Amino acid sequence: MQAFFNGRYVKKDEEVIRLEDRGLTFADGLFEVLRTASGRPLFFQEHLERMIESSIELGIDFPYAIEEVRAFAEKLIEKNGLDEGELYIELTRGCDINREHRFPPKGTPPTFFMLAIPLRKIDPNNWKEGAKVVTYEDMRHKLCIHKTLNLLPNILAKNHAYAHRGYEALMFRRSPLGKYITEGGSSSYFCVSNGRLLTPEIDNILPGITRSKIINIAKEKGYKIEERRILLDEVLVADEVFLVSTVSKLMPIRQIDNRVFRAPGETTLVLMKLYEEVFQKEINS
Amino acid sequence: MQAFFNGRYVKKDEEVIRLEDRGLTFADGLFEVLRTASGRPLFFQEHLERMIESSIELGIDFPYAIEEVRAFAEKLIEKNGLDEGELYIELTRGCDINREHRFPPKGTPPTFFMLAIPLRKIDPNNWKEGAKVVTYEDMRHKLCIHKTLNLLPNILAKNHAYAHRGYEALMFRRSPLGKYITEGGSSSYFCVSNGRLLTPEIDNILPGITRSKIINIAKEKGYKIEERRILLDEVLVADEVFLVSTVSKLMPIRQIDNRVFRAPGETTLVLMKLYEEVFQKEINS
């Protein structure tokens, strides 16, 4: 297996990173995960635009034009003989010599690399019968609108879920009105409640690529959508709940902690089918 | 210059880290910064104990006994010909093959490395006349009791301070009573107010090594100490304010945003002298 690293193809397990890389010492960088199919990364433009916008806001130089990245990525996927898989992209602020918080001098080359790896194994019953998820405190920072490398709280949340035989952790923050659910450890979520679709507004959460596709699809189909803070208590009495992410696509939830849902629900099934159409269209585009 | 990496000495700028290291892809790890003098890392036991306690809590294997680390560190400092300097230690959860949030299998070797670098240059007037600092929102996660690699909010805070010709950022969170100051971007702080010393309690802040030394010194000297949440408004009307950290030692503050303090204040000077004694004693121990 190969990887793309700063303009060249290297062995995926090759030692190419210096101890002085700010990605390693400060988590000073961004990442994206894209789904690949038929040898191509899907929804490429959207993922790259999000990454570039965040890199501008954080002051990290983005080293390539979008179309250059696409060409590098497609060649990498080809080299690795991947069809269904994942493309991981990371950008860091590069190396500094003495590990100082201070941004390194202008012109310091950033670190840019891509991994093209097989699609992670997910029990297909999760889509047929719904996934079990658990709740966990959202302990993250206030930069969640960016897809940053600061992932330790997500790791703890998801590993808590795995330890309880769950597929994902729904993370909550607290408000005077009670706990509200922000996101999954690596996914967004929607509730179906009295025929309406509810999903959190972009209030220190990630503007998910799949999330925005689902919103568009649902609007076209005539569903009423509310983007707002959603209390855990509301989630627990919803008619249907589902996860969305690049890798999970649209996945029904059959259990949140001890509360069991009929899954997949009617609306979830409609949206799963519609998203699959968008997904296939993207593959064939 | 050399570095210590997983049991061997390597060139400091050598490429030894894989793209699959979870320190690089998930910021899944811990670090320490120690002051060195006369070729030795200072307050070694305290720094290492803090790191090991956090590694146990986060479930990351710590690969050496404390005394082994000390021997490796002293040899590294000697190899680099350092007298006054900094020892940086980092521990990550090691590599996984496919970048999954899931902890890698038990027995996966962690990544452990140390850098021994020259002491960063700090204007000596900061100690004589006090440092200028600015306030900035504390956007960090809820794992601040651990010295994690999730440092992007600290980087943004400190670079905001540098951009405003400040030495440090005092980070604030919000409460119904108003903004309260948690920590500096890489330091703790104390206020002197009506003869008492105030410093934040360990409420999602780092239990700083220098912070705890100062508390002990001040208690022995008979000062009354309050560890509690401190509002920005209280800080701004304090008689004296000072920073403490491994590298800054005890540093008076002469300006916070637009508010100017007489610096160094009387109590600050007393404590600076006492801490310097503890520091010299540690060097000669």
Image: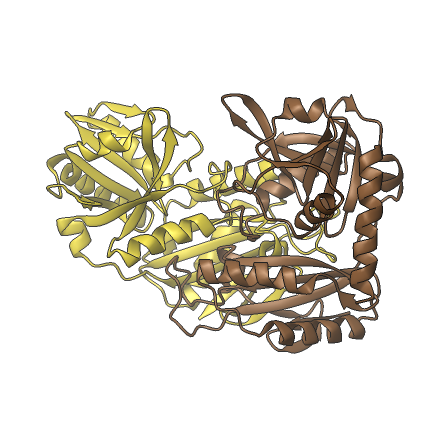
Chain colours: A yellow, B brown
Residue at 33% from the left image edge and 32% from the top image edge: A180
Q: Nearer the viewer, residue A231 or A20?
A: A231
Whether residue A75 is visible, yes or no, is: no
Question: On screen, A114 above or below B2?
Answer: above
Q: Quadrant of residue A222?
A: top left
Residue A189 position, x and y percent, is 29, 38
Residue at 48% from the left image edge and 53% from the top image edge: A89
Q: Quadrant of residue A84?
A: bottom left
Q: Nearer the viewer, residue B277 or A33?
A: B277
Whether residue A115 is visible, yes or no, is: yes
- Tell whether B155 sits left or right of B28: right
Residue A134 position, x and y percent, is 27, 47
Residue at 75% from the left image edge and 47% from the top image edge: A105
Residue B136 position, x and y percent, is 63, 31
Which quarter shows the N terminus of chain B? Answer: bottom right
Question: On screen, B165 above or below A155?
Answer: above
Which quarter shows the C terminus of chain B? Answer: bottom right
